[in-house]
Image (tube, grey):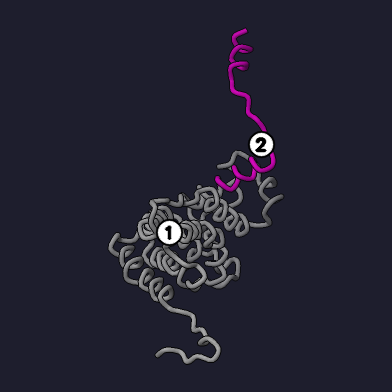
Amino acid sequence: MATVASEASEPVRRRRHGQQLESALLTAAWDELAEAGYARLTMESVAVRARTSEPVLYRRWANKDQLVFAAIQHYSKANPVPVPDTGALRSDLLAQLTAVSEALAGYYAITAAAAFSGLLAATGLSPAQARDKIMETQALPRTRIIYQRARDRGEIDLERIPPAVLALPFDLVRHDLLMDLKPLEPARILSIVDELFLPLVRHYQAAQDPSPPPSGRTAAI
């Protein structure tokens, strides 16, 4: 009877299926990448961490490299950086860039280590291709919420600001993260916003589209 009671008290292990299973596998792969590094990560080590078998992984990803890229993208999507709403474009940007810097420093350290420890050589991707693949989930759509709110408040005219200018603050933060693999100093974030981005915004907003003078009149000089 004691044996029966003991067995009955043990938690029932539920089988994982579909999206739940895939999420668990990718989380295990990310954790293994963060702790062991790309060179020591294997399909077997991920399977052990995920408490599953290697065939379960191979049914979804043909090799270690595909699994690692999928794990990187899954982590990024599962951990989005919150978009602040402070009521002003400048303070929104300062808060967002600070949050991005703090949240992604570890992410870039892990992915950069993977790239330089064999991921690039194994996949045959160029550094630019690997960067695009790793960063494709961090494009502007979420950050554009800041600009849309600023437009609604009348702070910015999105029709006048080139896309490259709107992307500039986030591109510079990503560049610094990739170069230093640590959060940016507050002074650097202030410089990006106050000395680079906002002056460009003012420049383009002040520019007036040339329009022809009314018919039969001479334009004032």
115 to 83, vertically: above or below: below
Look at the numbered discs 2 and 1 and tell me whether their residues touch, using CB distance below 8 Å.
no
Q: Toward which corner of the image does residue 16 lie, by quadrant? A: top right
Residue at image coords 68%, 45%: 56
Residue 174: give its label.
Answer: none
- Give 86 or 80, whichever is nearer the viewer: 86
Quadrant containing the C terminus is bottom left
Residue 209 place in picture, x, y as percent: 49, 80
Quadrant containing the N terminus is top right
- Give 84 or 134, whichever is nearer the viewer: 84
- Residue 153 is at least partly visible in this image: yes
Element marked by disc 1: helix
Residue 156 place in picture, x, y as percent: 44, 65
Residue at image coords 45%, 67%: 171
Residue 109: give its label.
Answer: 1
Judge the density around disc 2: few (<14), some (14-19), many (≥20) Cα neighbours within 10 Å: few
The residue sitting at the front extreme is 216
Residue at image coords 45%, 72%: 165
Query: Mainly helix, strand or loop, the magenta region?
Result: helix
- Between the C-alphas of marks 2 and 1, the distance is 31 Å
Element marked by disc 2: loop
Residue 16: give its label.
Answer: 2
Disc 2 marks a residue whose amino acid type is: Arg
Q: Identify the magenta region.
A: 1-28
Residue 157 place in picture, x, y as percent: 47, 67
Disc 1 marks a residue whose amino acid type is: Ala
198 to 144, vertically: above or below: below
